[in-house]
Amino acid sequence: MELKDKLDMILPKVQKPSRYIGGELNSVIKDKDKVKMRYAFCFPDTYDIGMSHLGMKILYSLKNAVPEYWCERVFMPLADMEQLMRENDIPLYGLESLDPIKDFDFIGFTLQYELCYTNILAMLDLAGLPVFSRDRKNLFPIVMAGGPCVCNAEPIADFIDLFVLGEGEEVNLELMRLAERYKENSGSKEEFLIEAAKIEGIYVPSLYDISYNEDNTIKAITPLKGAPEKVKKRIISDFDKVFSPSEFVVPFTQIVHDRAVVEVLRGCIRGCRFCQAGFIYRPFREKSKGAIVDQIKSLIESTGYDEVSLCSLSTSDYSDIEGLLTDITDYTDKKGVNLSLPSLRIDKFSDEVVKKIKSVRSSGLTFAPEAGSQRLRNVINKNITEEDIMKSCRIAFEGGYSSVKLYFMLGLPTETLEDIAAIKDLADKIIDLYYNTENRSKKPITISISLSTFIPKPFTPFEYEPQATKEQIEERQKYLLELIGSKGRRRIDVSWSHYDTTILEAVLARGDRRLCNVIYDAWKSGCKLDGWNEYFRFDLWKKALDKNGIDTAFYANRQRPYEEIAPWEHMDMLFSRDFLVRENKKAHEGITTANCREKCAGCGINKCLGKACFNYE
């Protein structure tokens, strides 16, 4: 029976079958007999999440812009579909051709979240491939991965042939051209990987030997067969010329972010000490207003979407945000297209911004103070004051908003119960402000407080810090609830993340290669879709950790000395280790660092790239 016939038989039995059929508007179909290289772009989560991801849209279009290359999309099936695929001998396939991906030249995963690692093993196995790279002897398929988690790829290093560190727009095509030559000359996989490691931004884990000290810390990371001592991340220097798709695949079913998306800037000027993205996506670069507006026009015309979102780590840090919004709304207002502005900074919120976003965000606004007290906001270098918060809330309330969601973290370095109490005090002040604001809505105010547990991540000033223990987090949650309950909870709702998922994320984020066997054993025992609460099984993860003699506290809850060799020591993110240490020390002194526009902090990345960079003072 043909694969299409098998799919026709099983799809009526699964939820949202349109996730698995392809054929959407703007999907790319090519004649496979005329294609030299085939690439399966695998998003290790569901269709609904993967189709919302801008990076996938960019790289899908980039590869397909080359006539002789064909990139297809692949997503992690939900449990109902996976079971039926296994029962009916349906291997994992590309949505465009419905061909098994084990026959492709490249199978590429994007690593956006540590709790997707078991999904990668599930997808390789469903494709009919060995999950360990050492067991895949043939040149093709080449299993690769990119994305932010590559800054510490060690916990998944045994499963992947090579990783892309940094921005993929240029290096992906360089890699495919190299593979094309090896395909024509019938080269071996080992020869290809040795040559690939010479491309800047390519990390081949099999070319590095890791040795350990008796206390389980890393003793040395030794490159082999000519591999570089440090793998330098790739950077797109001219951001206006970076590849941007003129059309997106438009899904049949609703996805998480069902709208057109345009990237307006990359990197961040802020330097919040807990934020990995703010450091690993440096340097800060903007697109011109003209380029942004042109891309919005192209996407709206080619997709038919009636909403467009401006994507970045901090959209309101665009140097001329009000001018940009004016240029965009000159077009979107005429077309009846809504404008969405996520990633707004509290201290950049203005009447003009409210006017531009009110049409799509009239129900509520979200701000991220991250910490309740000014002392702790200084420790994490949030660089916003209570005055900034109150000013932004007042503008929102005068603009008709009656709902505010506030994001905070628990377990931040140096945190005390006084800092927890300050969260409740801040919420009370916002409520009082609302009822003392003239021209506000007649609706009662709703305040939602969302609490996440701080996770120390590589390549941040807090990579050395311990994660708070479960007992410490539960104590702080209970304390805050008691404070809120003492005056009644009708105006303040509180939610928080599950500690078991956050400690596992911390272990995987800061772990080494000894975790590869843990991930394998967890997957074999049934772990997958770990980022979904209904599928997450910490009991199975605990068994896998115990089986391999892994203590979560060693990776997650331990203060690390500055001189310790980190598992990611051989990854070069182009800013200096001294800079991170300096920022960590300033955090413990409660000293803030100005944003990049105000004063250079001396991270060294622009200097490394040969661009103008001020000396650190």
Image: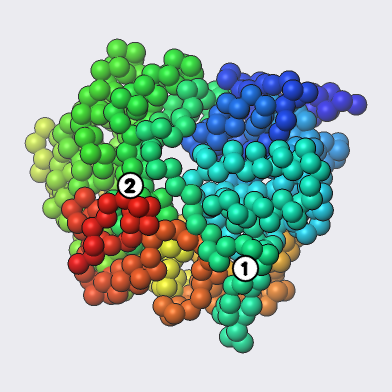
Q: Position of residue 582 (x, y in %)?
A: 30, 71
The answer to which of 284 and 237 lies nearer the viewer is: 237
Q: Residue at x 72, y 40 (%)?
A: 181
Amino acid type at circle 2 is Phe
Q: Secondary structure at mark 2?
A: loop
Q: Residue at x 60, y 84 (%)?
A: 213
Q: Position of residue 577 (x, y in %)?
A: 39, 69
Q: How far is mark 1 from mark 2, CA to CA?
A: 31 Å
Q: Residue at x 77, y 37 (%)?
A: 184
Q: Position of residue 453 (x, y in %)?
A: 42, 62
The answer to which of 143 and 248 lies nearer the viewer is: 143
Q: Secondary structure at mark 1?
A: strand
Q: Quadrant of residue 468?
A: bottom left
Which residue position is annotated with label 2? 284
Can residue 425 be seen at all in this image of the molecule? Answer: yes
From this view, report whether residue 494 is shown above or below residue 358.
below
Q: Which mark is residue 254?
A: none
Which residue position is annotated with label 1? 223
Amino acid type at circle 1 is Pro
Q: Please say which color scheme the image uses.
A: rainbow
| Relative side of 54 to 139, left or right | left
Q: Residue at x 33, y 34 (%)?
A: 287
- Label 1 vs label 2, nearer the camera: 1
From this view, report whether residue 189 is shown above or below residue 506.
above
Q: How dense is the environment of label 1, judged by Cα within 10 Å: few (below 14), some, or many (20 and up)?
A: some
Q: Quadrant of residue 591?
A: bottom left
Q: Quadrant of residue 134?
A: bottom right
The answer to which of 593 and 485 lies nearer the viewer is: 593
- Which numbered disc flags the more N-terminal residue, 1 or 2? 1
Q: How dense is the environment of label 2, judged by Cα within 10 Å: few (below 14), some, or many (20 and up)?
A: some
Q: Position of residue 1 (x, y in %)?
A: 90, 26
From this view, report whether residue 469 is shown above or below residue 312.
below
